[in-house]
Each structure stands twice: as structure tokens, then as C-alpha cells.
Image: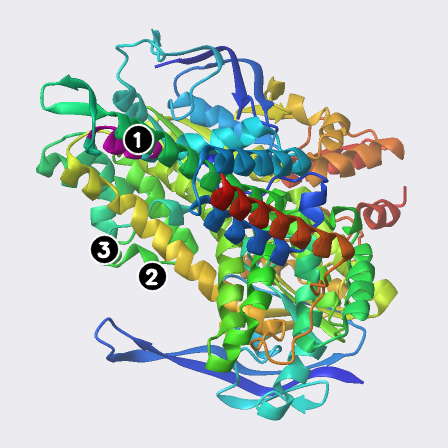
């Protein structure tokens, strides 16, 4: 079953100068086609300005393709009647943790989505409780979001989306503003949701090491998908990744260097355990 | 222009329920021309510490000496200190405000009361130093990319001709390419001008390749203060306080456990490659 | 300095007052304020003080904390005091230069000072014991009937609660921007009025830009979570009156009656 399907999705916008005259047209997403299966963990990787966030915003019907079509759970995002169903089945977590928390108490924020959907009070509480437990933030339910760390805030945001019972969660650079600890916690929470709750996860990021557990990776550059495959397939192409100035994990890089210097190692080593095994130790 | 931090304590928000010791008996000497990394977890006191160095925050107890003078002396010129010890904050969005890049960079030297010609000369030089393209000088700073904004922010402080340049998480929010470019730029600045640089970061991998000395902060205290290789030897302790040594350190450690005779010294991929090849050759 | 303002702040603790329905607290505060301007005599003030004291005691908020918030408006208080003291016509007690202090002036000044202090402490108890969200919920519910006249009650309440959520974030941001500009040699403290106003530009521009960006992001995040106005929305924490709320209404009405009786018969 495919949850998100894009066919030749193109997004163009007109740049204007201060007087409002047309300066030119920018193509942020250029003929992207992809098919994401229900229950997958997908990573979309790319630099700032590669079009990855623009593409993500299409999946939640915040933006609409200027050409091509995007379906969420079989529904065309251009179909206005389905707008709220689409936003409910494909939830979105954004980059800046401060700018997406609406509630002044953690639990109230998590309840915001279900409230909008018109869920009965009793069920809202059940959903809030289970969502906060799923991201390991239940003990903070009475706290003010302002007193939480960045990683904790992002996990609250994930819970807020989870409480809407989506089929798919799109995380748009959720870790870009976090410290290493916060980053680990957020990625761990996303992986757990995928493993336990079988929610489809689409992780948009520019950190390579966050993508090694994904089922599939799409690498974007200048609006197009330029590489696609499993992490092992992607990380086997070290020279190409370096050329695209993406961060290759140090283990992969080390294995690659050793291989270049004549050692007999396979391509695409992702963890230190794999390296040790490959070295025959 | 040595900076000496002498038994500095700082209590955050005293007599409130939030009161806590943000800095706890800090002693440091920062000589001329060093390239230093200050590493710590969020809330470790690293940002508070650097804000003491240019007098933005005043210590609850202790002294700070700049060039032999106590900066807490009544007749000490704080404004001069701020121009000599330049501090670039984490987000350039917090300081850019002028209609174009060039005027924004002029803000700092203008505040020093310099002549207009001198102000413009310095600003031009600073923008050149950070490798900012000439054709963007009269762009609005708000339309620039994240990396370019960061360059303008750094130029804005460099234009005051500081002797010490402090950068608080200069790579936060940048992608790997932007990160590499900014770090490369800082390294080049240090080499070319001989300016003292203090780089505040929470990422060991960011600083490992660049700095000559690492100060690790934890809970308001200096935990380690040494050359990178020595600091990384404590990777277990670093992990306990939420920091990590570069990934290579862990790989080498794991290899040693499996009986491969590699040394503890390697912290970069290049060093590790050589070290593993050497160990296998002598096996 | 900004931290000293406790008016409008919430003080987290457990108490009966904290648990009351926000509508009771809003209604109670309004009645209390009105009562301060009704029938003034010594007994009336005593009753008002007694009632206030009782509520403070019940609220478990340290009195010291409330008084700290008063510091911010001390100037206003002194100003009214001085104006009343010198400018009330009547029997002069002390005269120097062109100013005279009259007996009526003293009485008026004391009255005004008491009223103002009671008013401020009274309304700060409401904000200290009610979370801002609860407060807006209460107002939304109380103003509900206005919807008939096409007043966007829900939208106004939502705007208020979002504003309250972002005030601490923007305060912190102001502090950061200020530091960043001081590090570039900006001077926010010296100079005349015009110079000072001008020196605010490097502070206000980044602050406004950031606020607009935040507003934009927030609107997008709210839409992504299916927000489409008050229509068809359910409540996670609907307001329901409990026994203690009805009892409190009784106490408030009792207080008002007492005030009226004292005013008429003493």
C-alpha cells in the first residue's frame, strides 16, 4: 500500500523585487516522482535550498504542486474537500521547536490537534496520554513548554501530531536546531514510532548519521532526486557523496580509505561493529 | 593581550526559585593567538563564560584581567573591552538590522566613534576577510542564505578590529557544506591575522580538527583543559556528561579491545587509516 | 528588571483558589473591584481588607511575591498619592511655598492609595492563581453570548492565549538581541531622548523580523494540525462548575451584601 505517491511534482514560484516586478521564476521542486509505502522509514537528505523542505510541505497540503500530482493515502492534495483528511493522515513536525507549540502546558499542546478534529473530551485525554508515553514525555505533561530543552520540545511536537492518529508523520529537519543529545532523543522517538506503532516516518534532514536506519534514502539536489536507495547502497558511493559535499559517517569514510589503500573490505560499512567484522577481528 | 579569568563565580538569578550556580570557580589563562574550543552541553555554562570575557555579564565573585587590567575596575573602559574582545552570537538574525550588508557591518566601527572613512575602510576589509562577494554588498542582509548571514555577522564584529574573537556556536543550523565553509574560514582568519579565537560548540567533531586547545565545561565547572588528543582520551567520562569524542576514537577503542595494536592517539580519519594500516602491516 | 513584574504571572502551587473555575475568579474579581468604589467608610475598607486577606491566605501565594510585583507600579501609586495630597482643596494643615496639605487631601490620598493597592493585589490574585490558558478559556465562555452579535469570541481568546505563550519567548529574544548589539558597541543607556529612541532601532528591527517569522511558522503549524477556527472544535478541558464554585459564588455575594449593609447602616 502506498501512503504517499508523487508523480512529476514540480513547484515553481515567482520572485519579485521590492516594487513587485517579476525578477524570475525559481523551480524549488523539479519533476519529483516517488512512491512511499505504508510503514516505511524514509529519509530525504539534502543541503539547505535543495528543495527537500518544499517537497515536504506538499505532503501535508501546505503547498500544492504547480505541475504534477501528489497523493496522500490515495487522495489528491489538490482536492479541497479532502484537505482536512489529508492533514490528519499526514502529520507534520517542523524545524523550530518554539514556533509550533501552541499550548502553555505540555498536555494542552498535545490535545490541540484532537480538539481541532472535534474528538470527544474523554478520548482526547486517552490520546494525549498514550502519545506522550510513546515519546517518553509523559512525566512532563504538566510542565510549561518554555522550561523544556529543545529535544524535549520536539518530542512534544511529535506527540502532538501522534495524537491525531496519522498514518504518516513528516519530520521537516526536526533536529537542525538541537544539540547532540536532543538529536539522539528525537531520532530514537521517531524510530520507536515506526517500529512499535507502524507509523510511516519521513525524515527530512541534512545529517547523514540520522539516516542509517532508514529503509530508503532519497538524496535531493537543486529540486531533483539525485540518488535513491537503501542506506547501504547510498553509503557505498562515498566519492559521489563527498562530491555532493554531504557528511559521510566517519566509520564509512574510514572503511572507504582503508579499501582505497588496498585492504579487502566491502562497500557501505555503516557501524563500527560491521567494520570490526569485515576486518576479521 | 592575555585574558585571565581568576576564580570567577556567577550565580544566575539570585534570590529566586531558579537560582543556581552557572559558573563555579573558573580559572583560565588565554594567551595571545591561541585557537581554543570551548565544548559543553546545553546549560553547561559555556555561553555564560564567554559573555563574561567581554563584560556583557558581570561575575558574582572573582576577577577578569584583560591586558593586565581588572575589567571590573571603576575606571576601566568597558566599551573598549567590547571592541577588543569581539563576540559573535549564535544566530546572525539577532544582530542584522540595516538595509544593506555594508551598512550593517559599519554599525560596530561607527559605535567606536571612528571617522567615516575609517569606518568604511574597516568594513570593506572585514567583508573581504570573511570572503563575502562584492556584488552582494548592497543586498538586504535578510535575503541572504544562512551561511552568508553568518559571514556578515562575523564581519560586523571583525570590523571593530578585535584582538580576541569569540564565536558562540557559529555552525548551529547550517548544513554540512555551510558548516565546513564557516569553520574553514575561521581557521584561515586565525592563520592570516594571528587573532586569538575562541570557538564555542557542543560538537567535538566540529572542533577536533581545528583547535589547539579544548576546554570542556560541565555544570559550570572546567572539566578538562588540554590539547585535543589528551581530552579525547577521557571519552568515557565525556560520554557521561552528554558529550562524545569523535567517532574515530570509539572505533580505535573497539579495535584495541579486539586485540589490534593501534595507538590511542588517532582522532581523525586520516590518522586512523595510517594507524590501522601500520598495525595490520606489523601483524 | 523585567523579571520583577509579577502582574499577569502565574504562581504554581496547590490551593483551593487555584482549583476554582476561572469564571468564578473573573466574576469575583470584577465584583471585588466594583465593591471598592461603593460605599466607602472605615468599616467598608476593613471588610474589603479582611476579604482580601482571606483570599491571599487561601491562595498559598506568598504575600512577599505579590508585593514584589507592586514595586513596578510604585511610581504610579506615589504619583496619585502626591496629587491627591497637594491638590485637594480644603482646610489647610501645613503650608509651604505655594503648596498646602489639607485634611481632606490626606484622607483622599489614603483612600486612593488603599483602593489602588487593593485593586492591584485583588486582580493579581486572579492572574497568580489561574493559568493564562484557563483565564482565556474562562473569558471565552463568559463572552460566549456575544457570538450572537458576530463578535469573534473564540478567535480573540485564541489570540490572547498565543500572545501569552510568546511573551516569555520574545522577552528572552530581546535580551539576546540586546547583548548581541552591545557586543558591537551599541549603547542603550546614555544620551538624550532622541538618541535613545534611535538606539532602539538595532534592537527593534531584528525583534520584529523574528516575531513575524514566528507568527508565520506558527500559523503554518496550526493549519498542519487541522486548526480551522472555533467551529466544530471540542475541548480537552471543558469548564464545568463544581460544588466549590457555587460555594465561592455564595461567599462573593455574601461579601458584596456585607459591604452594602455596612455602607448603608454605618
Residue at image mark 1: C81
**Which corner quadrant holds the N terminus of chain A?**
bottom right
| Nearer mark to the viewer, of 3 and 1 | 1
Q: Secondary structure at mark 3?
A: loop
Dot 2 alpha-carbon crowd within 10 angstroms: few under 14, some 14 to 19, many 20 or more: few
**Which corner quadrant holds the C terminus of chain A?**
top right
- The numbered disc on residue B143 is 2
| B100 w.r.t. B40: above or below | below
Q: Secondary structure at mark 2?
A: helix
Q: Secondary structure at mark 1?
A: helix
Residue at image mark 3: B99
Q: Earlier in the sequence, mark 3 or mark 2?
A: 3
Q: Which residues are magenta?
A: C77-86
Pick whichever, B200 or C142, lies toward us: C142
Q: Residue at x 77, y 28 (%)?
A: B236
Pick whichever, A82 or C244, lies toward us: C244
Q: Position of residue A277 (x, y in %)?
A: 88, 48
Amino acid at each position: 500500500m502506498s501512503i504517499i505517491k508523487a508523480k512529476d511534482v514540480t513547484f515553481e514560484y515567482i520572485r519579485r523585487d521590492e516594487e513587485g516586478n517579476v525578477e524570475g521564476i525559481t523551480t524549488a521542486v523539479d519533476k519529483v516522482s516517488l512512491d512511499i509505502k505504508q510503514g516505511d522509514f524514509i529519509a530525504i537528505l539534502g543541503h539547505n535550498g535543495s528543495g527537500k523542505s518544499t517537497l515536504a510541505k506538499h505532503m501535508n497540503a501546505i503547498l500544492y504542486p504547480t505541475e504534477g500530482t501528489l497523493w496522500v493515502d490515495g487522495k489528491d492534495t489538490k482536492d479541497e474537500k479532502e484537505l482536512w483528511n489529508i492533514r490528519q493522515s499526514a502529520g507534520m513536525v517542523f524545524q523550530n521547536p518554539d514556533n509550533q507549540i501552541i499550548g502553555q502546558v505540555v498536555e494542552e499542546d498535545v490535545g490541540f490537534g484532537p480538539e481541532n478534529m472535534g474528538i470527544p473530551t474523554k478520548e482526547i485525554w486517552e490520546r494525549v496520554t498514550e502519545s506522550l508515553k510513546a515519546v517518553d514525555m509523559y512525566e512532563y505533561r504538566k510542565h510549561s513548554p518554555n522550561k523544556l530543552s529543545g529535544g524535549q520540545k520536539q518530542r512534544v511536537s511529535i506527540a502532538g501530531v501522534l495524537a491525531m492518529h496519522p498514518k504518516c508523520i513528516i519530520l521537516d529537519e526536526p533536529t537542525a536546531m538541537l544539540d547532540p543529545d536532543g538529536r539522539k532523543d528525537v531520532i530514537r522517538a521517531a524510530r520507536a514510532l515506526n517500529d512499535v506503532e507502524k507509523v510511516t516516518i519521513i525524515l527530512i534532514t541534512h545529517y547523514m548519521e540520522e539516516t542509517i536506519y532508514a529503509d530508503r534514502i532519497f538524496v535531493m539536489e537543486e529540486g531533483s532526486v539525485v540518488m535513491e536507495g537503501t542506506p547501504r547502497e547510498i553509503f557505498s558511493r562515498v566519492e559521489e557523496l563527498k562530491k555532493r559535499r554531504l557528511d559521510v559517517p566517519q566509520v564509512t569514510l574510514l572503511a572507504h580509505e582503508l579499501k582505497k589503500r588496498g585492504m579487502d573490505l566491502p562497500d557501505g560499512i555503516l557501524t563500527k561493529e560491521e567494520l570490526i567484522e569485515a576486518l576479521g577481528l | 593581550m592575555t585574558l585571565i579569568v581568576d576564580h570567577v563565580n556567577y550565580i544566575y538569578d539570585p534570590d529566586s526559585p531558579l537560582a543556581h550556580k552557572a559558573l563555579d570557580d573558573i580559572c583560565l589563562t588565554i594567551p595571545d593567538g591561541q585557537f581554543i574550543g570551548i565544548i559543553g552541553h546545553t546549560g553547561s555554562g559555556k555561553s555564560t563564560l564567554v559573555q563574561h570575557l567581554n563584560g556583557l555579564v558581570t561575575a558574582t565573585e572573582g576577577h577578569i584581567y584583560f591586558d593586565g587590567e581588572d575589567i571590573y575596575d571603576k575606571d576601566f573602559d568597558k566599551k573598549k573591552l567590547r571592541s577588543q574582545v569581539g563576540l559573535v552570537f549564535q544566530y546572525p538574525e539577532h544582530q542584522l538590522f540595516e538595509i544593506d550588508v555594508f551598512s550593517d557591518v559599519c554599525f560596530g566601527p561607527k559605535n567606536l566613534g571612528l571617522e567615516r572613512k575609517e569606518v568604511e575602510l574597516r568594513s570593506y576589509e572585514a567583508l573581504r576577510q570573511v570572503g563575502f562577494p562584492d556584488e552582494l554588498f548592497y543586498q538586504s542582509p535578510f535575503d541572504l542564505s544562512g551561511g552568508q548571514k553568518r559571514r556578515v555577522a562575523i564581519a560586523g564584529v571583525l570590523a571593530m578590529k578585535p584582538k580576541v574573537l569569540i564565536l558562540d556556536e557559529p555552525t548551529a543550523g547550517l548544513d554540512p557544506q555551510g558548516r565546513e565553509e564557516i569553520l574553514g574560514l575561521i581557521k584561515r582568519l586565525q592563520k592570516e591575522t594571528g587573532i586569538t579565537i575562541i570557538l564555542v560548540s557542543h560538537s567535538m567533531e566540529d572542533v577536533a580538527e581545528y583547535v589547539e586547545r579544548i576546554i570542556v565545561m560541565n555544570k559550570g565547572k572546567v572539566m578538562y583543559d588540554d590539547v585535543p588528543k589528551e581530552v579525547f582520551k577521557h571519552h568515557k567520562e565525556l560520554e557521561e556528561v552528554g558529550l562524545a569524542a569523535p567517532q574515530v576514537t570509539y572505533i580505535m577503542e573497539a579495535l584495541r579491545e579486539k586485540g589490534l595494536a593501534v595507538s590511542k592517539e588517532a582522532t581523525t580519519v586520516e590518522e586512523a587509516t595510517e594507524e590501522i594500516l601500520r598495525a595490520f602491516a606489523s601483524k | 528588571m523585567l523579571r520583577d513584574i509579577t502582574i499577569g504571572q502565574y504562581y504554581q502551587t496547590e490551593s483551593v483558589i487555584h482549583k476554582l473555575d476561572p469564571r468564578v475568579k473573573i466574576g469575583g474579581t470584577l465584583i471585588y473591584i466594583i465593591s471598592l468604589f461603593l460605599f466607602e467608610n472605615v468599616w467598608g475598607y476593613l471588610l474589603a481588607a479582611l476579604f482580601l486577606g482571606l483570599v491571599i491566605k487561601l491562595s498559598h501565594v506568598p504575600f512577599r511575591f505579590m508585593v514584589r510585583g507592586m514595586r513596578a507600579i510604585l511610581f504610579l501609586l506615589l504619583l496619585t498619592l502626591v496629587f491627591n495630597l497637594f491638590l485637594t482643596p480644603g482646610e489647610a494643615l501645613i503650608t509651604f511655598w505655594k503648596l498646602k496639605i489639607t485634611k481632606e487631601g490626606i484622607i483622599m490620598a489614603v483612600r486612593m492609595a488603599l483602593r489602588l493597592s487593593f485593586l492591584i493585589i485583588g486582580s493579581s490574585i486572579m492572574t497568580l492563581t489561574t493559568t493564562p490558558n484557563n483565564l482565556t478559556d474562562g473569558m471565552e465562555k463568559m463572552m460566549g453570548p456575544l457570538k450572537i452579535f458576530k463578535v469573534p469570541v473564540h478567535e480573540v481568546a485564541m489570540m490572547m492565549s498565543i500572545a501569552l505563550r510568546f511573551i516569555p519567548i520574545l522577552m528572552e529574544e530581546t535580551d539576546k538581541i540586546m547583548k548581541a548589539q552591545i557586543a558591537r558597541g551599541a549603547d542603550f543607556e546614555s544620551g538624550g531622548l532622541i538618541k535613545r529612541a534611535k538606539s532602539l532601532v538595532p534592537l527593534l528591527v531584528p525583534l520584529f523580523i523574528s516575531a513575524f517569522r514566528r507568527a508565520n511558522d506558527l500559523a503554518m503549524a496550526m493549519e498542519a494540525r487541522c486548526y480551522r477556527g472555533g467551529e466544530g472544535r471540542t475541548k480537552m478541558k471543558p469548564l464545568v462548575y463544581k460544588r466549590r464554585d457555587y460555594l465561592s459564588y455564595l461567599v462573593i455575594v455574601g461579601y458584596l451584601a456585607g459591604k452594602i449593609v455596612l455602607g448603608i447602616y454605618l
